[in-house]
Image: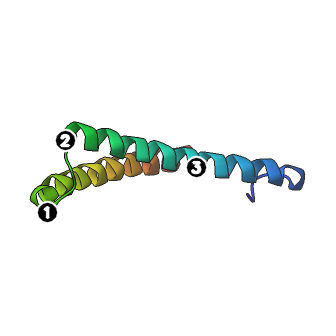
């Protein structure tokens, strides 16, 4: 926000909020795709907690990789 002129603060704030919401929506979509591929159409019960744990670990790994990629792009920008 400090890199824009005062008259564009509203636009910058709206753009930032929109990008944040799009990122959250995209991440939920990724989680749902991973769940549907690995777990399938089963009910949530103690018998398949391990499957849910494996999906969570895969999602967190993907998120960490994407985060590190974003860090490198941010460092390369300056």
74, 24: nearer the viewer = 24
Disc nearer the start of the sequence (1/3):
3
- Whole-angstrom CA distance, mark 3 to mark 2, is 26 Å
Q: Are marks 3 and 2 in contact (CB under 8 Å)?
A: no
Is residue 78 visible in the rendered image? The answer is no
Q: Residue furthest left?
A: 47
User: Looking at the rendering, in which quadrant would you find the N terminus?
Assistant: bottom right
Work out whether residue 23 or residue 45 is closer to the camera in this orientation and state it.
45
Query: Between disc 3 and disc 2, whose residue precedes?
Result: 3
Disc 1 or disc 3, which is closer to the eye? 1
Look at 35% across and 50% down and name the residue there.
63
* Residue 22, quarter of the rendered image: top right
Disc 1 marks which residue? 46
Could you say where residue 10 lies in the image, as x and y percent from the top left? 81, 52
Residue at left 27%, top 51%? 61
> Circle 3 is placed at which residue position?
21
Residue 40 x/y as whole percent = 21, 40
Secondary element at tag 2: helix
Callout 1 crowding tier (Cα within 10 Å): few <14, some 14–19, many ≥20: few
| Mark 1 → mark 2, Cα distance in angstroms | 16 Å
For marks 1 and 2, give the one nearer the viewer. Answer: 1
CA neighbours of label 2 inside 10 A, class few (<14), some (14 to 19), many (20+): few
Which residue, given by chain and number where applicable, does mark 2 sit on? 38
């Amino acid at each position: 926000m400090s890199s824009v002129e005062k008259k564009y603060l509203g636009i910058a704030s709206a753009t930032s909020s929109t990008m944040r919401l799009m990122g959250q929506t995209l991440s939920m979509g990724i989680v749902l795709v991973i769940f549907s591929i690995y777990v399938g159409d089963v009910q949530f019960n103690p018998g398949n907690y391990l499957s849910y744990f494996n999906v969570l670990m895969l999602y967190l790994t993907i998120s960490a990789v994407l985060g590190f990629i974003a860090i490198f792009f941010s460092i390369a920008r300056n």
